[in-house]
Image (cartoon, grey):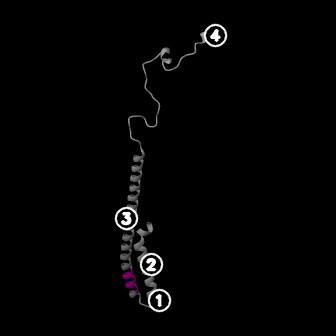
Amino acid sequence: MNYVQKLPFILAASMAILSGLISMEQGMETKQTCIRMTTVMVVFFILGVVARSVIMRTVEEVEEKRKALEEAELERLRAEQEAQLPEDDGKPNGSKIDYRIEDNTGIASLFDEEFVPFDIHNFEKQ
C-alpha cells in the first residue's frame, strides 16, 4: 500500500523525465522543455491522485465485503451450533449420575436396597 500512496508523485516524476528526454532529443529549447515537463508533471500528478483514490476506494470496498462475509459466516456457524444444542430441561448436560443426598444414613440403610447379606454363622453350622 506504500506504493499506492506515492503513486501520484512516481507517475508525475517519471512522465516529466520521459517528456524532458523526448524534448531534448527533438532539439527543443530549454525553456520549452521546462514548460512541457511542468505541464506533463501537473497533468500526470492529477491522474495519479485520481488513480490512487480509485485504488484506495476499491481496496476499502473489498475489505468491507470480506468483513461482511466473515460476519455472515460467523452468524451462520453460531446459528448451527445453537440448533445442535439440546433443549435445557433442568438436568445437567450429559450427566446420568443422581447427585441427590438422602437422609438414610447408618448401617441399616446399606441393606435397604435388594441386598441381603450372607449369613456366615448359619453357613458354618450347616
Image quadrant containing the N terminus: bottom left
As shown in the figure, which amino acid type bears the numbered disc 3? Glu
Q: Earlier in the sequence, mark 1 or mark 4?
A: 1
Closer to viewer: mark 3 or mark 2: 3
Which residue occupies the foreground of this view, 115 or 40?
115
Which residue occupies the foreground of this view, 54 or 87?
87
In the image, is residue 106 part of the stretch drawn in magenta? Answer: no
Magenta region, main secondary structure: helix
Distance CA(mark 2)–CA(mark 1) = 17 Å
Crowdedness of circle 3 by 10 Å Cα count: few (<14), some, many (20+)?
few
Place residue 99 in its image quadrant.
Answer: top left
As shown in the figure, which amino acid type bears the numbered disc 4? Glu
Q: Which residue is mark 2?
A: 14
Distance CA(mark 3)–CA(mark 1) = 45 Å
| Part of the protein shown in magenta | 33-40
Distance CA(mark 1)–CA(mark 4) = 129 Å
Q: Which residue is mark 1?
A: 25
Distance CA(mark 4)–CA(mark 2) = 114 Å
Q: What residue is shown at x 44% (from left), y 18% (from top)?
A: 104
The answer to whether the residues at label 4 and label 2 have Cβ atoms under 8 Å apart is: no
Q: What residue is shown at x 40% (from left), y 59% (from top)?
A: 69
Q: What residue is shown at x 36% (from left), y 70% (from top)?
A: 53
Q: Which residue is mark 3?
A: 61
Which residue occupies the foreground of this view, 39 or 47?
47
Q: Earlier in the sequence, mark 4 or mark 3?
A: 3
| Residue 76 pos. (x, y %) | 40, 53
As shown in the figure, which amino acid type bears the numbered disc 1? Glu
Q: What residue is shown at x 38% (from left), y 88% (from top)?
A: 32
Q: Earlier in the sequence, mark 3 or mark 2?
A: 2
Place residue 122 in its image quadrant.
Answer: top right
**Circle 3: element type:** helix
Closer to viewer: mark 4 or mark 2: 4
